[in-house]
Amino acid sequence: MKNTSFENLKVYQMSEVLADNIWDIVIKWDSFAKDRVGKQVIRATDSVGANIAEGTGRGSFQDNRRFVKIARGSLFETRHWLRRAYRRKFLIDEQINELKPLLSNLAPMLNGYLRLIGDSSNELRTKD
């Protein structure tokens, strides 16, 4: 499959790594844990990258910014579900320690991407 613009974004690539890592963890859980928490955390994590992709395909800076904000919300939802999973003993310290850097780095990257989109839209508007 040919790479499109969103696939070249570091923020999107990091969201994929996070989603794949969480998938690899959740797939090993028992059916009760998967059904109660696993489905939720996978949906939330997959939503981060999906919203980045959808925003780039919308064709306007305003839509792209809106979808990046939704992606950021999904990242915070992911953090919530991971906290629930850890408290319910579905995750161990080692797994959390592997996920923390991804979670910590992805939020500022989303914010940076959001600022970049804003700057680009302002530049284009002043050139018209």
Image (tube, rainbow, N blue to C red):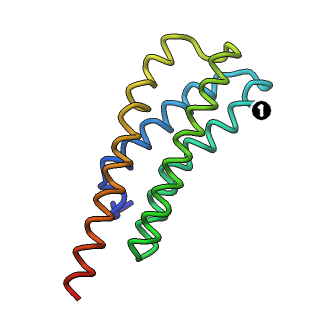
Q: How many labels does the image show?
A: 1
**Is residue 89 found left or right of 32 in the rendered image?**
left
Q: In which quarter of the image is the C terminus?
A: bottom left
Q: Quadrant of residue 104?
A: top left
Residue at (43% x, 20% y) in the render? 98
Image-quadrant location for residue 53: bottom left
Q: What element carries label 1?
A: helix
Q: In this view, does 7 lie to the left or right of 22?
A: left
Above or below for 104 versus 62: above
Q: Label 1 belongs to which residue? A: 35
13 relative to 83 in the view: left or right: left
Q: Residue at x 71, y 16 (%)?
A: 88
Q: Quadrant of the N terminus?
A: bottom left
Up/down of 3 relative to 30, above or below? below
Residue extending furthest right? Answer: 32
Which residue is outermost to the bottom? 128
Give the image location of residue 36, x and y in percent: 77, 31
Residue 70 locus on image (x, y percent):
53, 55
Packing grade of label 1 (10 A; few <14, some 14-19, many >=20) is few
Amino acid under disc 1 = Asp
At x 49% / y 48%, what residue is drawn? 72
Residue 32 position in % (x across, y down): 80, 25
Would you place residue 28 above or below residue 107 in this image? above
In the displayed structure image, the side of residue 59 where residue 123 appears, left or right: left
In the rendered image, the vertical position of residue 16 relative to residue 1, given as above or below: above
Can you tell which quarter of the image residue 23 is in? top right
Which residue does the image show at 66% across and 16% down from the upper left?
87
- Residue 78, x across and y down, in percent: 57, 36
Of the pair 7 and 70, the residue shown nearer to us: 70
